[in-house]
Image (cartoon, rainbow, N blue to C red):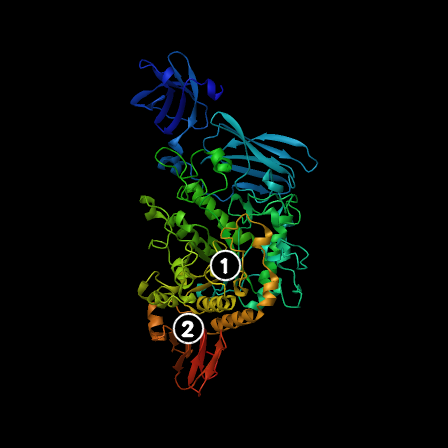
Amino acid sequence: MTKNKRPFYCYLDDFDELTIIIPIKNYCDTNKYFLVGNDEIIKLNISQKINLGIEIKLICYFDAYINLRKVYFVENQNKEMSELYTGKIVRTELFDNIYRYKKNDLGFSYTKTSTKFKLWTPVAKYVKIELISPNNKKVIYDLTYKNSGVWRAELEGDFEGYKYRYLVYVNGKETIVTDPYAITSNANGEYAYVVDKDNFYQMKHSSIFSGNMNDAIIYEMNVRDFTIDPDMNFKHKGKFLGVIESGVKTKKGLSAGIDYLKELGITHIQLMPIFDFEGVDETNPNLKYNWGYNPVQYFVPEGWYSTNPNDPYARINELKEMIDALHANGLNVVMDVVFNHVNDATKFPYEKTVPGYSFHVDKQGMLTNISGCNNDIASHRKMMRKMIIDNILYWATEYKIDGFRFDLMGLIDFETMNELRQELHDLDEHIIVYGEGWNMYSSNLTDRMAHMQNKKVIHTIGFFNDKFRETIKGATFNHKDKGFSMGNTKEIETVKQMLLGSANNRYMFKYTSQSINYIECHDNLTYFDKGLHITSDIELLKKQQLFANSIVLLSQGVPFIHAGQEFYRTKQKDENSYSSSDKINLIDWSRREAYNDAVQIFKKLIKIRKENECFKLISTSEMNRAIEIIELESKTLMMHLNEKCNLLVMFKPINKQETIIIPEGYAIMLATNNNYKVENNYEYILEDIGTYIFRKDTKTC
């Protein structure tokens, strides 16, 4: 029965309630309705009638058990009928409790003699699996329902290398569905594959990171951007393997690629999305560009970064090899994950298998759009929470991922975040977790979300500190607004709090380890591009950015660096380059040459931070004992780290000469600007913007 020929439409909204929508031309007050199916005819009791203008909505109750795997019809006394579709029942607490599946075997389980397939879809009337052999022979098998909403098939034989997808009957039609737990696929994700894990690259190296968030120095980069520069001789440009090519040099012989990362001294590489995403063509990699915040297959590595996206093993093994080589070079890998929305709600596997379950809807039943991506994942629902946690644990175990950065984490419920944080801690204490903690809800949902104002979020989850960014750099959405690093000293009291990790007397956080300190990331204008809106004096802008970089690295909390920030990265003033060209997004290695002096200072700042525990204090009590910040009349801030380290750091935001007297025994060890004079051993004339670090004696702390 086609939809346009149906006399009315009906939806199951609870285990004892359904809704009938009748075009007003077909409506008659005297009509009676019955639920027909599973060898039963059940009278429907109309409890409410609502006139919608062109339609009449009837809310009906019934007293009977309904089997969600059976096809039911609603019929009137004229024998007109319509198939009963799944409605709001999937969003009831009872549905969530009954059909919660607890085992960790969704997807496929392979052996050389048999393969099990499991798919969660409590409302499907039947499920079939289509398999295509390596020699292109197609076979279709039925799955049987087991329990807790799971359909399964155990097929005898060796199915390694077979492509597969499901055929699911839900809401009156058969739909093609890819496996939401697929771990690899062909190009552009038409089919998943059965693969043998014995054929995976065997990773040999692991992280040696302490697990202390304050020991981390995070460097955000994009796999493609890192090696796509046409003037560089990377062999695997834009690919996983390109990231780990050693021996690559700039034209003037300076280090590039992985050698550069190792020299820089950072601890963690945060990779922009490496799961399978929409927005590119894996078979034509230069056709389109995309950052990747368009999730499609959560457990599958992105084929755009593979040398052969149609080889189901290539994307897996090349990603594993990349991570293994990074570990071998002392670098940890953070994965940028996106669980606040999907690319297309209508194509998301669970939306096909359990319509209406996976996403938030408004009072009219329409998808909400708080993420700005036309859908918002309902992470609090048990099987969505399970998928998120299963996914994170899979990447952590199978690929040895060392940390997870959550995109728009404020749209994920705090219970899900707390549970996965604990699961990761139990798995490996070195794994770090942080995310964008913006409070984006204005409804009662805000209390259950993992935003930075919600004290129910476990303290071992970090947050991007946008107040740090706005205070030091200037307002993100006012291009001409200046922050402290550009000479605006009006918010100097806030600057002091930022230097103390936004955790002094719980200013924003309980501990400094919760504060991810940054002035730029992949979003919005780079620092350099924002500066170009304010000044045409490039030399001044370079001083200001180097000054700002030093504040990021010397503040309490966790420093976060956008790749190329250290050599004044520009995107030609493009503030949202998510789908812009390689020319806009690439890492321009010629700037690494041109501004090598700034890179060297950056490396020294990192070295100072890593060697001095006084930059990695956690609590207010520790900071009260060890740190004193004094505001000079010139608005220069003097930070005295007086416990063990005996360091004095001067943060000078104004291009105006001043004379400072430093305590006896201290000598300058690093300045971001060498435009200063020493009148005697303790009198320094500072003539320009910059950070000046003095140390007592020459001992290492």
Which residue of the protein is positioned furthest toward the front in this rendering? 536
Q: Please identify the quarter of the rendering in which residue 458 is found.
A: bottom left
Mark 1 — residue?
529
Q: Earlier in the sequence, mark 2 or mark 1?
A: 1
Q: CA distance from mark 2 to mark 1?
A: 22 Å
- Does the residue at mark 2 contact the one at mark 1 (Cβ under 8 Å)? no
Question: Count the marks: how many?
Answer: 2
Q: Nearer the viewer, residue 169 or 65?
A: 169
Residue 144 x/y as whole percent: 52, 31
Q: Secondary structure at mark 2?
A: strand
Instruction: Give me the disc on residue 90.
Output: none
- Residue 579 vertical placement versus 233 (above, below): above
Q: Residue at x 41, y 55 (%)?
A: 478
Residue 187 seen from this side: yes
Q: Please identify the quarter of the rendering in which residue 96 is found.
A: top left
- Residue 449 vertical placement versus 491 (above, below): above
Q: Secondary structure at mark 1?
A: helix
Q: Nearer the viewer, residue 475 or 16?
A: 475
Q: Residues within 10 Å of mark 2 (few under 14, many from 20)?
A: many
Residue 676 x/y as whole percent: 47, 80
Residue 548 x/y as whole percent: 45, 66
